[in-house]
Amino acid sequence: MEAWGLTDPGKVRSQNQDFYELRELDDGSVLAVVCDGMGGARAGNVASRLAVEVFYQEIERVMDPRFSEKELLRMLKEATELANSAVYEQSLLSDEYVGMGTTLVAALIRSDKAYVVNVGDSRAYHLNREEIRMITEDHSVVEMMVKRGEITREQAKNHPVKNLITRAVGTEETVESDTFVQKLKPGDSILLCSDGLSNMMADQEILFEVVHGASRSSCCKRLLDIAENRGAPDNVTVVIVTV
């Protein structure tokens, strides 16, 4: 497997409240996580970094190569719950942290499968030479409106409340996460990103840059450059793992 990741504050914000981590585990699998923090001052930055750190620590503590699919998904959900508790408890310790939270999307990639967990609107995509498909489902107000038939998918991209999410890590005592399993073939990629990328690029544009662009090792930089050339009003983070 090959893996790359980059994050950037974008063109408007002075602080980067995104945080990501990308590591190879002892059994050779790859674990990637992206968090997009929210909260005033430095609170969003604290939330995203803390969530990533706690999530990784828990995975590394309990990971067993003998785990079944069901056990792996439960492990991801429990690690997310621990991250939620850590951020929530931290938010109670200082006035500047009140209400802070973060999205979380993570993928554990082992040979021919990716195990994914998400909370919020940071996304996981599956890409091959033919297509790009969003694995996760946004936990957002506009996604609910699309499901109810109130707006179209195209209208959702520029809706005034497109950045309002309905679930986040750390804003409440408990959190509900979604899990997914994606089968992989040689040459397939898993892409994780914050909404700073997905709001600036169409899915097919992302596919072209990852699959048909220049060297695979530079595709994260190309994606960030495109977002920045379009104004990048938010922090931008992208992680790509290719099997």
Image (cartoon, rainbow, N blue to C red):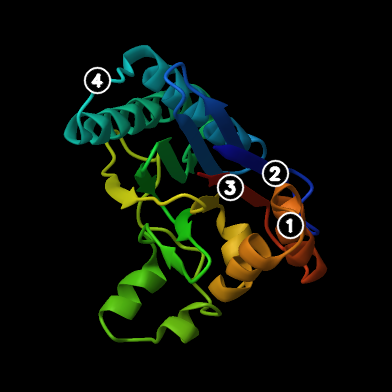
Q: Which residue is drawn at 40% across and 46% down?
A: 168
Q: For the residue marked with disc 3, what is the amino acid?
A: Ile
Of mark 3 and mark 2, the one earlier in the sequence is 2
- Circles 4, 1 touching at the beta carbon (< 8 Å): no
In the rendered structure, the answer to whether residue 127 lies left or right of residue 119 reads right
| Label 2 residue SS | strand
Q: Name the residue under label 1.
A: 224
Q: Residue at x 41, y 17 (%)?
A: 60
Quarter of the image with the N terminus in it = top right
Return the residue nearer the eye: 180 or 200: 180
| Label 1 residue SS | helix
Q: Which residue is drawn at 17% across and 35% down?
A: 70
Q: Residues within 10 Å of mark 1 (few under 14, many from 20)?
A: many
Of mark 1 and mark 3, the one earlier in the sequence is 1
Q: Mark 3 points at which residue?
A: 240
Q: Name the residue under label 4.
A: 66
Residue 26: percent from the left, percent from the top? 46, 16
